[in-house]
Amino acid sequence: MQLNLILLLGALLFSAGLFVVLTKKNAIMVLIGIELMLNAANLNLVAFSRFDPQALQGQIFSLFVITLAAAEAAIALAIVVKVYRYFNTTDLDQINELKG
Amino acid sequence: MMDLLEAISPQISPYTLWVLVLICLPLVSFISALVFKKNAPTLTTFITGLNLFVAIYLSFLFWNEPVLIRGNWFQIGETHLTYSFYIDRIALIMGVVVNFVALLVHVFSTEYMRIDNRKNAYFAYLGLFLFSMMGIILFNDLLFIFIFWELVGFCSYLLIGFWFEKKSASIAANKAFILNRIGDLGFITGLMILFTQFNTLDLSAIKSFMALSEIEDGNWVVTFSQNGSETINRLDGRWLSAAGIALFCGAVGKSAQFPLQIWLPDAMEGPTPVSALIHAATMVAAGVFFLGRIFVILDAQALEVVAIVGAVTAFMAAIAALSQFDIKKVLAYSTISQLGYMVLAMGVGAYSAGLFHLITHAFFKAGLFLSAGIIIHQLHHLESEKHKFDPQDMRVMGGLRKKMPWTFFAFTLCALALAGLPGFSGFLSKDAILLNLAVWSDIKGGGFYIPEVLAFMTVVLTAFYTFRMMFLVFYGEFRLEGITGDLNLGKKLKEGNLWLTIPAVIFAILSISFVFGTTLNAEDTWVLKSISTPIYIVPIAYAAQSLVDVPHETFEALHATVNTVSILLALAGLVIAYMSYKPGAKLERQFIERREPIGVLGQVSFYHWYQNSLYEKIILRGILSLSKRVAWFDQHVIDGIVNGISKLTVVLAYLVKWFDLYVIDGMVNLTASTVGKVGQMTRNMQSGNVQTQILITFVFIITLILLLVL
């Protein structure tokens, strides 16, 4: 299998994640987008590792990323819950306390 | 050639501590009087008594061997300042006399000031005075003598103005202080001249250098080594005389000599025991004592000035004493007159005679003042709302002989001593002075007979005013009854109690000549035997003819004449006083009605040669107009300049303000508003929307990556 195809898939997946992050109003959906982007990065790591003759650095690194993603999801969801309790909404357009 | 550092090298004595005790005990008395307010009289009297014993103890120690104690005080560069004590016979005698008089005055004051509210301050001042006086007597360093000299002046100021609520008392205190300052100006000048020439103020070192100094071509030259190198100090020879005269100016102020003597009569505003202690017996004699200290470094011209001033003062004051109404004023003028005798004695070179008169005068004048104090104190008790009178005025006295026998006894003995009648101490010392004066006049000749004539005339005058006072106060009728119309006043008048009479009587007994020797010849008294006149050590060309070098026969030849003449003159004074002021005499009867003396001579006498008015009219007016002009100059010129400068500053400040407001602030505001505007322009980026921010971040990262890659 060609590396280019896999990288293309990764790019598509990343773009999809980014699109979700930028367009969805619900914070949970934004989190889902972030997960997609992380997985796109994992895909790239694994793909590069496939063509690396010496070691399994890419796979190992992606395992770390997966672990990290799980932790991030847990914390982020907790934050979302807190945000919801505080603002009574998860609509990101309405949560604009930092407006200058 | 002498080394300077050697001349002022420290000298140690095992008895230094005793000397310090003698000086500092009165200071303890001063402090204790301030701390223990209620017991001040008892405590200070006790401490003064203790100090008297210290003085007597030291006299036994040092009588035959004068001791010099010296130490380094501090050093600035090459200049060494020392402190030193010199305890010789005259210091010891003075120490005992001063402490003794002070002790009796303390005792007297205990009763005299019993009802005064501020008596603890009074006793404190006495302690401070005694401290300062002991400093003058014991220190041998001119700088220290000067410091204590100022201190006694200050104490005198405090005590003259003790009843400062009386306007006249505070003015008198100021007058005494200011006139003393004028004298002290001379003192400082003298110190400066001596320091310039000798580089030290230690009196013993000055004396040893003075003995080595020479006159070369009219220059006064002294050579000494310092740090191995030779120093030659050269001044015009006239500075030698100037130094002596300048130092004498200090004594003129302190000892109330012409032309600064007018403070002493006014000083009688102070309490009478103070007049006895400070303004009769001790402080005013400090000037004479100081002349004794510097006696050997006075040159012929300075001594002539001293003698003439002394004679003039003695005569002027004796004239002034003739017509006073106030008993204390008579005593004050008589004090000035007697101080004139002492200064005259110093001037003619009769060192020991002058100091002898100082001692005898201290006793009989203190006795007179204390007796007068008793009279004033007792008359003061008669004063009431109904009868207001001046208890010091002799017009209200008279006939006190029977009412106050002890006071009469004390007063009479002291008065006889003052008049100089044989058998009393004043006769001996005055005789010694007159004899030396006669010899001096014979040596000098010419115009120098004038002091002799003045001095002998003063003898008559002294006897006259003394007995005038006696007759007016103690004989005849008690005039107060007649003045007030209350005939019971005489019965109410009592003798003072023992606190008052005992000190006065002790002084009276000390005024009898046997205290000083059972002789009518001053030469044979123990004082003159123990104090010998030193020889002048100024360069020969400037030195006066010393009376020590005059053969004894010259004195012998004149002695009988001088003795007889002075006794006859004193008796003449007594007779004249009796004729004019005996009870019932014409003058005595007129006396009570008189407001001021009649005739030109009477006026001149009563107003003390108009010296006071002269100063007020000419010098005081001159000073006042000068100060007015200076004030005008200050107000118009100096203030004008100051105001101009301030106005200029204000104008400048306005300019600076404008610059600050428009230029500096403009720049600051420009910066701030620019930053603000930029902020306004960019604030839209901070929408607060997370997704927008992520988008912007993303775009920037992509741009960054693209920039890095491409």
Image (cartoon, helix red, strand yellow):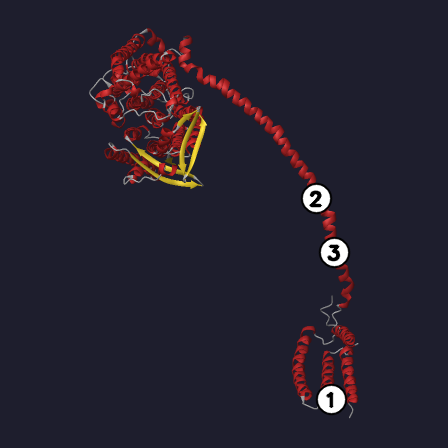
Instruction: Locate residue A16: give its quadrant.
Output: bottom right
Q: In which quarter of the image is the C terminus of chain B?
A: bottom right
C-alpha separation, residue under disc 2 versus residue under disc 1: 75 Å
The circle drawn on residue B656 is 2
Q: Which residue is drawn at 57% across and 26% down?
A: B630
In the rendering, at what x and y percent does residue B465 appear? 33, 14
Q: Which residue lies furthest to the top in this view?
A: B586
A51 over B116 or under it: above or below: below
- Label 3: which residue? B671
The residue under label 3 is which amino acid type?
A: Thr
C-alpha separation, residue under disc 2 versus residue under disc 3: 21 Å
Query: Viewer-proximal residue, B672 or B69?
Result: B69
Q: Which residue is drawn at 40% across and 13% down?
A: B605
| Chain under disc 3 | B
The residue under label 1 is which amino acid type?
A: Ala
| Chain under disc 2 | B
The residue under label 2 is which amino acid type?
A: Val
Determine whether label 2 and label 1 are within 8 Å by CB: no
Query: Viewer-proximal residue, B256 or B161?
Result: B256
Q: What element carries label 3?
A: helix
Mark 2 crowd level (few <14, some 14–19, many ≥20, 10 Å Cα): few
- Label 1: which residue? A47
C-alpha separation, residue under disc 3 versus residue under disc 1: 55 Å
| Chain under disc 1 | A
Q: Can residue B256 be seen in this view?
A: no
Q: Quadrant of the N terminus of chain B?
A: top left
Instruction: Locate residue A46: give its quadrant.
Output: bottom right
Q: Is mark 2 on a helix, strand or loop?
A: helix
Q: Is mark 1 on a helix, strand or loop?
A: helix
Instruction: Locate residue B157: give its quadrant.
Output: top left
Mark 1 crowd level (few <14, some 14–19, many ≥20, 10 Å Cα): many
* Sequence-earlier tag: 2 or 3: 2
